[in-house]
């Protein structure tokens, strides 16, 4: 089976090589046969890579530990459902997976190419074949997943215990797929640039593929945050780790792109700029691959690190040179037909949006490479983590949220100041209301969350305002409320899908502000039957169950959570700490039990690794979040109890994000008709 | 001409970044000191204040502090019974400490992240005679900036930290270091 | 450059200036130790702060933070204490002094460059109209 897999890989390598050369010769000699034949080579590559992937999965299922990759990432004790995770948990397997996604997506886009893109497809195929060729090359010679150990082995090392979590079934494959699919719009954009004349033909399919890549990447990052929140046991969901940053950067650039492509679609501007954005996104994705696999940066995500740094750096340099050469070769021939007409126009608001997103991206990029800079120049290692990113990106993210509220209100081309003022009055009033009520009624003193909530209220109410007023218009023409709204958002799916995504971003923003600025937290060590009191909650330690399995020792601590009246416990509180502990006999009978949480602490001797699962009781208002820190010899358990306000909204945003993206992608009847006619 | 200048504006910073990336993976060492165990021998720069004080209670219950060792060379050995390189070092240190006591070199063992039972067994097995202490709250470890074990800190007769050695020593390497130090001291005193 | 534009430039720097200044005296020792444990990295873990890390050394370091706070040390002094012992990389982000000013100044430069480019776009807009 391993031989089959490897030979298919080699076959894929030669086929994609033919894809590049055949296409180039075909285009130069204008031979249609050669172009068609090399296009079919891509389909065959997809088939070969699929066979490779199936044989690797088969090797995992059949426990063939004589294969090094299977030996390193699986063992007999592993639940078979984790084969899917184990398969991409290492460098070789994940590269194979990326190659598979890349070939599959390329085949689909090339096969179902719409008539409009016919002229650029040969060039796009060439570029895609080139990228696939590179990955096949790496797989065949540098990271061969089918390498054999040489001797028979009874059992493998096993999967990294941190990866055995439901989130792992979808988080890494989604991230990798999202980053791989960026290649498709990149190839299309550069193909149209090489072709030179048809700069608007690619944008429909380019926008769709970008949205797919962007949606998968975004959902993957959210899932990763959720995984970190529930399993890594450090109480956070985003740590501005280099690996997180390199996934975020292309996503931000793609976000800029899906906004500015609308300008090209509607007004025919930003043609060149959109291509630049895709080039940056692709290069940043390659930078991410480099950092991930053998890059020089320290990260918590060291699952797939390897010594492939040179290989990926070379590819990064190659793709940089490629896009530069194409760009500067073609750019003198292209002139934008139109300019922005007014400062107060939708185009202009998208320009500012792009500027903010790019600034954030470059600031993150600087933070990622600064440690290398310091290391090389003055030979001192430094760490750049959360404090830098929060402080520099925080204000820009706030501006972005405010822009999210202003942008949709401004019409294309130019707007009347008076009408705009009338439109902006409602959201502005709402945000002022929030501002005042936060200061006066709730009495907040920290101005950052106040400004943040007010701007989020502004953005949200501006969407609501538009929905309400437009729905009203439709109602007056005779529709019912729900059908009126439904028809409204269906009238321009790209736009209203975007609004749904905006709402999800605001929800994420609420979670971020809530958890960062209003978190309550205490560290305590308690015996059985003792309780920790924090804020309005009492957490009682009721049971401990210890289990030993072949590969791990699990301690599960059970705790009851009670809602209490803190005044009843005032006499026990201490001055220095927020939370305090009390014994069984001091418990008040009025406490209301609101749930039971389980804290898991697992030790894997063969990995010398601890895996911690926090106990979480989640409500839309706040999460009670308990991390088991240590199990002391005297029977006490050390726990970190925190109350994370509005963390729930972070995860609730996920479905909205996916829904909005899908909605924006859903083809309207008109689109389908057009395509059929074109064919 | 103008467009060429434009190209340069982009190319210069990008090539600088690429150069940086190349340089940094050239200098990248693949060594990984996982779980705080130093498996290879090296001298480390002394970054902590060189007059860092300490005062600990030994396993026998006596209190010792840095001032008790004025006029002697003092070797602080941070170790643990579960750490493999430390286990190999055990008999070597036991031997050397007896030998060099005559030449005014004292040893103190500081056991970190360990249990009393294991530490006592280890001392018995290797017949270690010099004082040992368990660093229960990690105060010594953090005060002396110890990242991994084994690590040795050598303090000169004036109470100044003069050497930091990470990773396991062989009999020869440690004796050579002590030799150099004592010779230097004699020269300096003269 | 006209004075109006200059004012706009200053205004654009404003968000960076107001962000992230919390008065440490308002906080309890527990809150400060928690804050510090988010600003100091675990020296033996890869890219984890003391707060995130489960390692024994970071537990010891957290105890040290509490001891130093009890002694009345300021946050600055505690950060220096750890920098002296574990090197600059023990801080989650380098301080804004010396060579590291570079790290903190480049974001403003990026932001300002962006603003200048946007100004240019609008200037061209006026010309063509």
Image (cartoon, grey):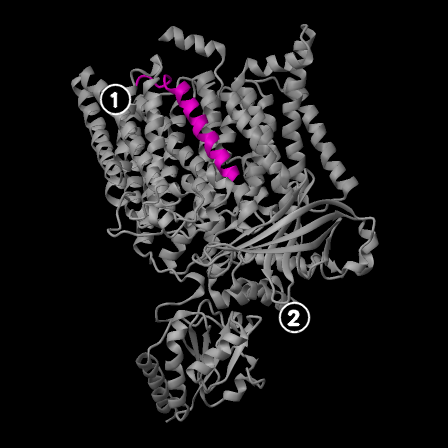
Determine the chain carrying the residue at label 2. C
For disc 2, the marked residue is: C71
Question: Which residue is at the front of the view, C33 or B148?
Answer: B148
Position above or below: A600 against A216: below
Residue count near mark 1 (Cα–Cα under 10 Å), binned few <14, some 14–19, many ≥20: many
Same chain check for tags 1 and 2: no
Magenta stretch in the rendered image:
A195-223
Residue C48 lies, with reference to residue C66, above or below; the image says above
Q: Is residue A211 magenta?
A: yes
Say whether residue A305 is visible.
Answer: no
Q: CA distance from mark 1 to mark 2?
A: 73 Å
Q: Which residue corresponds to the image point at 64% horizontal and 64% vertical from the top-left?
A: A635
Q: Quadrant of residue B116?
A: bottom right
Report the residue that reaches farthest toward the left: A29
Query: Which type of secondary structure does the marked residue at label 2 adopt?
Result: loop
Secondary structure, magenta segment, majority class: helix
Q: Is residue A634 above or below residue A52?
A: below
> Residue A516 location in percent, x, y?
62, 46
Q: Can residue B170 be found in the magenta stretch?
A: no
Query: Which quadrant of the figure has residue A90?
Result: top left
* Mark 2 surroundings: few (<14), some (14-19) or many (≥20) residues within 10 A: few
| Protein chain holding label 1 | A
Q: Position of residue A39 (x, y in %)?
A: 25, 22
Looking at the image, residue B184 sits to the left or right of residue A216; the answer is: left
Horizontal side, residue A320 vs residue B143: left or right? left
Residue A204 image position (x, y, % from top left)? 41, 18
Q: Which residue is mark 1?
A: A39
Q: Nearer the viewer, residue B81 or B16?
A: B81
């Amino acid at each position: 089976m391993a031989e089959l897999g490897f030979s298919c890989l080699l076959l894929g390598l030669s086929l994609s090589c033919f894809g590049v050369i055949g296409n180039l010769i075909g285009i130069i000699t204008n031979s249609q046969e050669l172009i068609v034949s090399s296009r079919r080579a891509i389909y065959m590559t997809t088939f070969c890579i699929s066979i490779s992937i199936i044989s690797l999965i088969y090797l995992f299922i059949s426990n063939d530990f004589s294969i090094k990759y299977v030996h390193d990432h699986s063992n007999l004790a592993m639940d078979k459902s984790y084969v899917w995770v184990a398969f991409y948990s290492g460098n070789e397997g994940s590269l194979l997976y990326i190659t598979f996604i890349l070939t599959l997506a390329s085949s689909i886009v090339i096969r179902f190419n719409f008539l409009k893109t016919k002229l650029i497809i040969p060039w796009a195929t060439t570029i895609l074949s080139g990228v696939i060729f590179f990955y096949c090359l790496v797989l065949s010679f540098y990271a061969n997943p089918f390498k054999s150990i040489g001797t028979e082995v009874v059992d493998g090392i096993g999967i990294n215990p941190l990866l055995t979590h439901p989130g792992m079934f979808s988080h890494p494959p989604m991230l990798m797929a999202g980053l791989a699919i960026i290649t498709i719009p990149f190839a299309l954009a550069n193909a149209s640039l090489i072709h030179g004349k048809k700069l608007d033909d690619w944008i429909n399919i380019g926008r769709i593929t970008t949205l797919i890549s962007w949606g998968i990447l975004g959902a993957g990052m959210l899932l990763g945050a959720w995984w970190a929140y529930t399993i890594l046991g450090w109480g956070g969901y985003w740590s501005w780790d280099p690996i997180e940053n390199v996934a975020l950067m292309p996503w931000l650039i793609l976000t800029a792109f899906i906004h500015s492509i609308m300008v090209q679609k509607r007004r025919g501007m930003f043609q060149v700029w959109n291509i630049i954005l895709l080039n940056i996104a692709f290069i940043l994705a390659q930078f991410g691959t480099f950092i991930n696999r053998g890059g020089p940066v320290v990260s918590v995500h060291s699952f797939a690190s390897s010594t492939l740094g040179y290989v990926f750096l070379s590819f990064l340099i190659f793709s940089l040179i490629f896009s530069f050469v194409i760009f500067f070769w073609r750019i003198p021939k292209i002139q934008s037909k139109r300019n922005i007409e007014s400062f107060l126009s939708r185009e202009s608001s998208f320009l500012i949006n792009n500027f903010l997103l790019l600034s954030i991206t470059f600031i993150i990029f600087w933070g990622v490479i600064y440690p290398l800079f310091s290391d090389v120049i003055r030979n001192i290692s430094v760490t750049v983590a959360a404090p830098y990113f929060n402080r520099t990106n925080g204000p820009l993210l706030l501006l972005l949220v405010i822009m999210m509220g202003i942008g949709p209100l401004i019409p294309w081309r130019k707007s009347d100041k008076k009408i705009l003022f009338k439109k902006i009055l409602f959201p502005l009033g709402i945000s002022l209301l929030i501002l005042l009520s936060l200061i006066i009624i709730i009495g907040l003193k920290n101005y950052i969350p106040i400004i943040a909530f007010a701007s989020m209220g502004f953005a949200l109410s501006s969407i609501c305002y538009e929905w309400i007023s437009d729905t009203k218009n439709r109602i007056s023409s005779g529709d019912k409320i729900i059908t009126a709204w439904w028809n409204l958002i269906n009238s321009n799916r790209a736009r209203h899908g975007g609004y749904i995504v905006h709402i999800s971003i605001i929800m994420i923003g609420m979670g971020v502000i809530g958890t960062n600025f209003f978190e309550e937290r205490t560290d305590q060590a308690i015996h059985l039957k003792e309780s920790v009191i924090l804020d309005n909650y009492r957490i009682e330690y009721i049971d401990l169950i210890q289990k030993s399995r072949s590969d791990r020792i699990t301690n599960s601590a059970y705790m009851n959570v009670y809602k209490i009246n803190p005044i009843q416990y005032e006499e026990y509180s201490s001055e220095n700490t927020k939370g305090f502990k009390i014994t069984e006999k001091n418990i008040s009978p009025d406490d209301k039990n609101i749930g039971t949480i389980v804290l898991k602490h697992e030790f894997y001797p063969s990995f010398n690794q601890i895996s911690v699962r926090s106990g979480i009781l989640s409500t839309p208002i706040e999460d009670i979040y308990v991390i088991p820190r240590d199990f002391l010899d005297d029977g006490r358990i050390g726990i970190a109890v925190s109350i994370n306000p509005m963390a729930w909204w972070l995860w609730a945003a996920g479905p909205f994000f996916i829904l909005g993206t899908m909605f924006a992608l859903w083809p309207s009847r008109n689109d389908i008709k057009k395509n059929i006619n074109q064919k | 001409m103008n467009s060429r200048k434009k190209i340069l504006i982009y190319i210069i910073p990008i090539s600088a970044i690429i150069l940086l990336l190349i340089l940094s993976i050239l200098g990248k060492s693949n060594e990984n000191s996982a779980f705080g165990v130093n498996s290879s021998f090296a001298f480390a720069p002394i970054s902590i204040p060189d007059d860092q004080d300490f005062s600990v209670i030994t396993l026998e219950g006596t209190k010792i502090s840095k001032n008790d060792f004025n006029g002697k060379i003092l070797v602080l050995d941070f170790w643990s019974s579960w750490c493999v390189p430390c286990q190999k070092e055990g008999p070597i240190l036991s031997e050397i400490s007896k030998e060099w006591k005559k030449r005014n070199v004292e040893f103190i063992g500081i056991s970190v992240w360990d249990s009393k039972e294991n530490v006592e067994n280890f001392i018995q097995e290797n017949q270690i005679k010099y004082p040992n202490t368990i660093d229960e709250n990690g105060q010594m470890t953090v005060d002396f900036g110890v990242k991994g074990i084994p690590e040795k800190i050598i303090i000169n007769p004036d109470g100044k930290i003069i050497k930091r050695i990470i990773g396991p020593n062989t009999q020869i390497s440690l004796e050579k270091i002590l030799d150099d130090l004592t010779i230097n001291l004699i020269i300096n005193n003269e | 450059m006209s004075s109006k534009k200059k004012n706009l430039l200053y205004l654009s720097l404003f968000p960076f200036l107001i962000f992230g200044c919390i008065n440490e005296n308002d906080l309890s020792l527990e809150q400060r130790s928690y804050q510090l444990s988010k600003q100091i990295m675990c020296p033996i873990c890869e890219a984890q702060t003391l707060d995130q890390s489960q390692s024994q050394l970071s537990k010891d370091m957290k105890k040290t933070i509490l001891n130093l706070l009890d002694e009345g040390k300021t946050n600055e002094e505690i950060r220096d204490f750890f920098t002296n012992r574990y090197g600059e990389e023990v801080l989650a982000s380098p301080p804004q002094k010396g060579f590291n000013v570079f790290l903190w100044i480049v974001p403003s430069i990026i932001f300002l460059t962006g603003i200048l480019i946007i100004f240019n776009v609008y200037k061209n807009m006026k010309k063509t109209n």
